[in-house]
Image: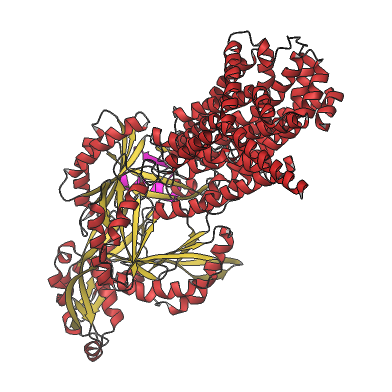
Amino acid sequence: MKLTELSLSRPSFTTVVFIALFVLGLFSYFHLPADLLPKMQFPYVAVMVPYPGAGPEEVEQKVTKPLEDAFSSLNNLDHLNSFSQEGMAVIWIGFKLDTDPDVATNEVQRKYNAAVHQLPPDIEPATIQQFNLNDTPVLQLSVTGNLPEATLYNLVKNEIQPRLQQTEGVSRVLLLGGREREIRVEVQPEQLEAYKISLLQVLAALQGDNQDVPAGRVEQAGENFVVRVKSQVTVPRELEQIIVANTKAGPIYLRDVAHIRDTFKDPASIARVGGRPGIVLAIFKRTDANTIETSEKVREAVAALEKSFGVKITCAYDAAEFIKDSLAGIQEELGLAVLVVAVVIFFFLGSLRGALIVLLTIPTSLVGTLVFVRLCGFSLNLMTLLGAALVVGIVVDDAIVVLENIHRHLEKGEEPVAAALASSKEIGLAVTGISLTLAVVFLPVALVSGIAGKIFREFGLVVVCATLLSLVVALTLIPLLVARLARPQVQSDTSLQGHLDGTGKGFLAQLSRAYEKGIAWALAHKKAVLATATFSFLAAGALLPLHLVGTEFIPKVDRGEFVLKLSAPPGTTLEKMDALVQGIEQEIRALPEVKDVFTTIGYTTGQWDAGASSNVAELKVLLKVRGAEKTAPVKEKVKALAERRAGLESSLVLTSLFGGAEDAALRIELRGHNLQRLQETAELVRKIVAATPGTQDVRTSVESGLPEYNIRVDREAAAAHGVTTSDVIQTVGLYLTGKVAGKYSDGKDQYDVRVIADPAARDDTNDLPELLLLNRAGEPIRLGQVAKFSQETGLKRISRVDRQRVFVVNANLVEGYTLGDAVRAIKEKLAGASIPPDVTVFFGGEQKMFEESMRDLLTAMVLSLIFVYLIMVALFESFLLPLTIWLAVPLALVGALFALALTRDTINIISMVGLIMLVGLVTKNAILLVDFGNQARKRGLSVNEALIQAGALRLRPILMTTAAMVTAMIPLALGLSSGSEMRQGMSVALIGGLIFSTLLTLFVVPVVYSLLEGLKEKALGLRWRR
C-alpha cells in the first residue's frame, strides 16, 4: 500500500502529522460545548390569540377555524393542531423537518397578518413564536428575602425577572407564586342603585381623575417649561375624594359608593419548594442554546443579583446536573472500555509491546475525531460520546488485523520493515474494505430523515470519521511503530500454532486445531450447517410475533425524578386545590427516599400559560439516589398516596430524556366533525384501553368545562331601552373581574388600581339580572330588562388536528409492559368494536413517532446493505462472492434479537441503530475469510484446502477483533451510570449479534463459499464444453 510505504520512508513526517492531530484534538476537547443531546431545532410555530370572554365553541368558530384556513396554504406544511378554550385559541403549525424554523415563523406571521381582518375586533394581540417540543424549565429558582411580601414580589417582577431574561441562552422566565399588591375599589351595588350611578361611570371617573400627564410647554424668559397635570393619588385613601358624579344635592364621592382596600391581586398560581411557599422563577432556554452553558450563565447572573438586591436566590432544580453526570458516566465507561480492550489484546498477542501499539490507535483516532466534531459545530453529548464509546472496538479492529498479520511475518523471521511492507500488501485491500463497509453503513444513519435523523446525525458522522481515521492509522502509524519497536521472532515452521506456547497461547493453539477440524466437518456436512443457520434465523424471527421482544420509541431514562400530575373537578378554586394538594405533598416529602418536592398549583409545564387552570397541580419529586431500581418503588408509594385522595385524579410519569414530564405513553386520536359521536366513541375506546392488560391512568380529553352562566343580549329590547351590547359586556366584566383604572405610586413602585364589585355581591348569579345600567338618557336600566339568562356546562377545550375535531384517549403503561404490547392488544380489540364510519382512529404520540422512525431506519438499513454489497463487488471483482459475506447479516440479527429477548430490552430507535451497525461490523469476519480464501485459491489450492488454511490463519484476528468490540461494549451494556438506559439496548444488541454471527460465520461462510465456487466451476465447465 502506498500509504504504508510513505509512512515507512518518511517516519518523521508521519510522526509530526499525528502529533499535530492529537494536539488539535485535545484543544478541541477543552473548547467543545457539552449538552445532553445534539442541537435539534424543529420547525414548529405556535400562535396564541386571546379572545377575552368567549367560550370554547365561539373561539373555535370565530378565531381558530379562520386561522386554520389561512395557515393551511403554508408551504412545507406537515400538520396543523389547535385547541380552543375559554378566552384563548392556540394553534401549532408543524412544518416538514427540513424547513428553516426562522423562515417558517416569518411565513406564519405573514399569513396571520393577512387573515387578522377576518377575526373579531375585540381579540387581543397574538403571540407568534417558535415552539419548543420540550418547552420545560432548565432551572427553577426560589427567591426569598427580608422584605415585605409585596415589595419582594415587585422587586422580582420588575428587576430580577427582566435581568434573568436577558441572560445569554434564556428564552423566557416564568414567575410563579408570590402575591402582588393591588389597590381595589370595591363598589357597593346597593349604593350605586341608591345614587343611580353605573359601574362604567365609576370607572370613567377614576380613569379621568387619577392621572399624571404632560399638558404642554411654556416658554418664559428664554426657558422652556414642561407643564404637567399631576392628579395621581399618593396615598390610597385619597381615592375616596374623587368625585364620581355631580347632582343637585351635591357631589357624589367615590367613598359614597365604594370601599378602598390596599390588598393583593388574586393569585394565578401557587409555588412551593420543600413545602415552603414563595416566589419561583422557571428559566426556559432557547431551542438552540446549550443547557450547561445556559445554567452557568444564569448562576453567574444570580450571584450578581443577590449582591445587588440583598435577596437569597436558591436553585431548586438544575437540569444541567443530570447532563453533567450522564456525560461523566459515559466518559468513565469509555475509559473502562479502553482498559478491557487492552487486556483482551494482550491476552491474544501475548506481547505487551504489541498491545501498547494497538492501544495507541484509540486515543489517536478518538482525539483526532474531536477536530472533526469541532469543525462541524457539534457538541460533546450523549450521542457523540456514545459513538466514541462504541467505536473503541472498531478503531482497534483495523489495527489488530494489520498488527496480527505483521506479527505473523515477524514470526517467520522477517525484518520489521519488510514484515510491515509485506503485510500491508497482503492485508491492505481487506482492511480497506472492512473500514469502508463500516463507514458506508453509518452514512445512511447520519443522513436519515425525521426525528431519528435529528438524533443520530452527529452519532453517525462521528463514527464514520473515527472509522476512516482508524484506517489511516492502521496503514501508517501501526506499520511505522512496528518497524521501529518490534524485533524479528524466529519460530518453528510447524504452523501458526507452533509458537503458541505461553499462557493463553496454548488455549488458542488448541482452539485453532479444533477449528480446522470443525471447518473440515462443516464442508463435509453442508446441509446440516445450513439447516442449523436457517433454523436459528426462523427461531429469532418468531420472537417478535410471540411478543418476546417488545417495542417502544425510545428507552425510558431514569433521571432520579418524576412528576405527579393532579387534577380536581372543573371549577375548583385555587385555594381549595391548594388544600387538597398540601396533604399529599407533606406525605411525599416524608418518604425517606425523597430529596425534595417542587410544587406548582394552577400551572403545569408544557401548557404554555394558556393551559393554566386553578384545578391542576404538578409535583416534581426529586430523589436522593438515581436508578430505575430505586425510582420504581418510590413511584409505587407515591401512586398509592395519590389514589387514596378523594376528589383528585392523578397520573405519574418520569421526567423525559429531554427534561419535561413525559406525555402519556399511549395516545389514541379520534377524529371527526360530530362532537356527540366523537364523545361516545372516546368513552368506548377508553373502556377498551382500560380493560387492556398493562395500561393505567386511562383518561380522555373529554372534559366538562366550568359551569357556564350565559347572558344573551336581546338586541331589540336593548335598542328600545337605549343600551348597547358593548355597555352590557363592559358592565358585567367590571362587576365580576374588574378592570385596571390607573396606577398608584408609593414613591418607589407603581401598583394597579382595580375597579370591581364588592366580593359579597359577586357570590350569587341571581343578583346579575338586577345589575344597573344607564342608557344614553342617563336613565337606570336593569340587566334583566335587556338580556336573558341560562345555565349550562360546555366543553372545557375543543381540540382539532388537521382541521378536524379530535378527542384523545391517553394512558400510561404498567412497569414491565411495552408500548408495542399495548398497541397490538388494543388494535385487536378495536377491530371488533363498533366505531362510527365518520370517526377515524389514529395512534399518535410515541407510537406514531416509532412507526415513522422505524420506516426511516429500515430504509437506512436497506441502503447500508446495498452499499456494503457494492463495495464487496468492487473489492472482489465478483457479483457472486459478496452474497457469501451478506450471510453474516441475518446471522447477526438472530444473535441481536436473542440477546434483546434475554435481557428484556426492546426494539427502539436506539437499539435499531445497533442492528444497522451490525451490517458493517459482522461483514468484517466474512471479508477476512473470503479474502484469504481467494489468495489461497490463487496459489493453486483446492476450495476446501484454501478455506481450511484461511480459517487457520484468520481465526486469531477474527477472535481478537470480535472480543475487542464485545468487551468494549460490556461497560455500556451494564448500565452503571446516569442516562445509561439510552445505550444499554444498543450495546446488548451489538454484543449478541457479534458473538452469534462470529460463531456461525466461521462455519456458514466457508460452506456457502464452497457451494458458490462449485456452482461457478460447473458453469465454467458447461460453458467450456459448449
Q: Residue furthest right?
A: 9
Range of magenta residues: 133-159
Q: What color scheme is it? A: secondary structure
Residue 190 position by quadrant = bottom left
Q: In this view of the protein, can residue 416 be seen by the observer?
A: yes
User: Residue 417 placed where, x, y %?
Assistant: 82, 19
User: Which sits in the foreground, 560 or 611?
Assistant: 560
Is 842 inside the magenta-drawn segment? no
User: Residue 607 placed where, x, y %?
Assistant: 37, 55
1000 above or below 88? above
Q: Is residue 513 left or right of residue 972?
A: right
111 above or below 938? below
User: Residue 822 placed where, x, y %?
Assistant: 32, 49
923 above or below 70? above
Is 147 inside the magenta-drawn segment? yes
User: Residue 154 placed where, x, y %?
Assistant: 38, 49
User: Which sits in the foreground, 616 or 926?
Assistant: 926
For image coordinates 70% across by 12% down, the residue present is 494
User: Which sits in the foreground, 862 or 250?
Assistant: 862
For image coordinates 81% across by 31% down, the residue present is 1
User: Which sits in the foreground, 690 or 188?
Assistant: 690
Q: In this view of the protein, can residue 270 be seen by the observer?
A: no
999 above or below 138? above
Residue 401 position by quadrant = top right
Q: Is residue 227 left or right of residue 597?
A: right
The mark tally for this picture is 0
